[in-house]
Amino acid sequence: MSGKTLNALLTAGAVVLAGMLLAWANAGLDNYSIRILNLIAINAILAVSLNLIYGFGGMFSLGHAGFMAIGAYTSALLVLGPEQKEMMWMLEDIVWPLSVIQIPFWASLLAGGLAAALFSLVIALPVLRLGGDYLGIATLGFAEIIRVLITNSASVTNGSLGIKGIPPHATLYVNYACLGLALYCVVRLLSSNFGNVIKAVRDDEVAARAMGIDTFRYRVLAFCLGAFFAGIGGALQGNLITTIDPKMFNFLLTFNILMIVVAGGLGSITGSVIGSVIITFMLEWLRFADSPFEALGVTIPGVPGMRMVVFALALLALILYRREGIMGMHEFRWEWLFSRRRKKP
Amino acid sequence: MTAPILQITDLTRNFGGVVAVNGFNMTVEHGMIAGLIGPNGAGKTTVFNTVSGFYRPNAGRIVFEGRDITGSPAHRICRYGIARTFQNIRLFGNATAVENVMVGGHVRRKKQWWMPLVFWPGVMEEERSIRSRAEELIRRVDLERYRNEKAGALPYGAQRRLEIARALATEPTFLLLDEPAAGMNPQETEELMQFIKRLRDEFGLTILLIEHDMKVVMGVCERIWVLDYGRLIAEGDAERIQRDQRVIEAYLGDSIDAAADGGGERAGAGPESGTEGESC
């Protein structure tokens, strides 16, 4: 029991420390660094949500960009004021209820998550009967359908013009608070017996059914929960860059998140967080490769896209030498930190 | 002891043109240890899969504790009180022994999945009781030293016992064991026989088992049903089955190699090997 209280205290301490670090970063860092920190938080939310679906639920889903698009659009449409919307919708006039509604930012975030979850429920019912690669293809198709729908329903979404001037509500604090909440929810659920059950469904569906588990229901549940957090992640991203358009939510976005999840470790929340830190940071840091630089005495001319080559090589190395990702299926534990510390002296 | 716990009437199940089970009848009384035997491919596992809800019967009725469960999905049948193990062990290999058993306990929970998020009253108590019940079952099947080991890394005999513990966690009244002695040496088989009897007495279970090892079948089963080519060819206690001419013919037949079936070989051929089938 004392071990548990100690862990709770340590976690509380870590949260306070993280808050202090954020306050320091917010005051002392330049805009570019803060932007990277923001992206890390949002990517971590997205990676954790995909991990819930793919890593823990065992459902190979490539629909994340679609869920993000729904979240981002729902939030943007609800948070903007009526005058702004009237001005921006040039192709067609905006439809009635949306033209007058304006709700607070936090409520729009929640609405974005719920809209994504609702949509995921609609596609889960037919699609989750599929398994493996087929599910991947079906969800990928649905994400594309969402994109096309958004492009073509100009009276709701302003079509291909996108939405601009979204108020920049997604500050450093907001993003990390959302990450904290998402982590709390996911970790708490997975450490309850629900976590054992969802992993059981992933590992052996037949045995899980014999144990009285309605496996389809649990798969739908995990899928919708993942979509919910993906919707919130998308909403945050829209509020961070203040402009969204349908082209943003293409397959590449899903691919980036999938990369974080696989690199971090399928079935590890810690891995997803670490993965999003490393990969978000690396994608920025590697920008030097796009400009001319000197390596081993050879001058390499600036080739645009060079950083993606370097990045792909790094990923290749990771997959070759550590296929299970950075964390495998393990999670961070305080005991784990301290038993190591004890061994050192 | 009034009404039978399980009553199967005229059960038929086809796979394409193959009739795996043909007009099978069976009545199991409360508290009995019953055996279902027959040569490879006789349709024993198909009977199991139909009773446990993995296959939908083509014809016939299955009544469990007075309730018609014909065609109910597997997870609901488990909730009614029928638990099973698998011929080819199906544990959750990545999870620890205790976690495996906790999954079994999940079916009896009363709280909803989201309740832990908001510390709903009673939800933590329920989580703790699922865990402590799992630990208790682990102790009772004598797996304490493996409790935090990955289930996939356990020795074979331990995996068999863990699978039974997991089934017991669903709080069944009726337990289906599919070849519990497969792959065990004589010493382990002897222990298993004691274990099965103990299970029935301590948990107040009714047990139906499929087994190729005749020592086990004759040693523990109070009543035995014999299947051959999907048909019931004999029914009765051990003594009667051993003397039954049709049973002897089914096992020995006119070719000598069929006799090997009696020696505890793991089954393979025929429609009954489709344990992982999901045709329902």
Image: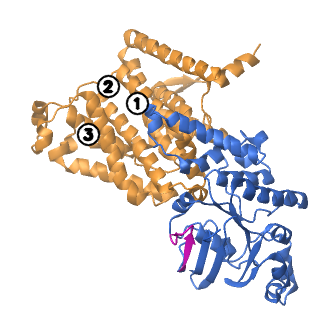
Chain colours: A orange, B blue
Q: Is the residue under label 1 in contact with that under label 2 (CB below 8 Å)? A: yes
Q: Is residue B221 left or right of residue A72?
A: right
Query: Where residue A150 sits: x, y (%)?
Result: 24, 47
Magenta-colored stretch includes residue A190: no
Instruction: Say few, some or many: other residues with alpha carbon within 10 Å of mark 3 (under 14 / 14 to 19 / 20 or more).
Output: many
Query: Where residue B146 sits: x, y (%)?
Result: 76, 42
| Quadrant in which residue B218 is drawn | bottom right
Instruction: Say few, some or many: other residues with alpha carbon within 10 Å of mark 1 (under 14 / 14 to 19 / 20 or more).
Output: many
User: Where residue A170 is drawn, which disc sits there?
Assistant: 2
Mark 1 and mark 3: span between their CA atoms? 16 Å
Magenta-colored stretch includes residue B67: yes
Identity, as a three-letter code, of the amino acid under mark 2 = Ala
Identity, as a three-letter code, of the amino acid under mark 1 = Ile
Is B163 above or below relative to A233? below
Q: Do the residues at pointers 2 and 1 share their chain?
A: yes
* Residue of label 1: A42
Circle 3: element type: helix
Which contiguous range is marked in magenta?
A: B60-71
Q: Which residue appears at 67% of the width and 77% of the height? A: B43
User: Where residue A73 is drawn, which disc sits there?
Assistant: 3
Earlier along the polypeptide chain: callout 2 or callout 1?
Answer: 1
Mark 2 and mark 3: span between their CA atoms? 15 Å
Circle 1: element type: helix
In the rendered image, the quadrant that contains the N terminus of chain B is: bottom right
Mark 2 and mark 1: span between their CA atoms? 10 Å
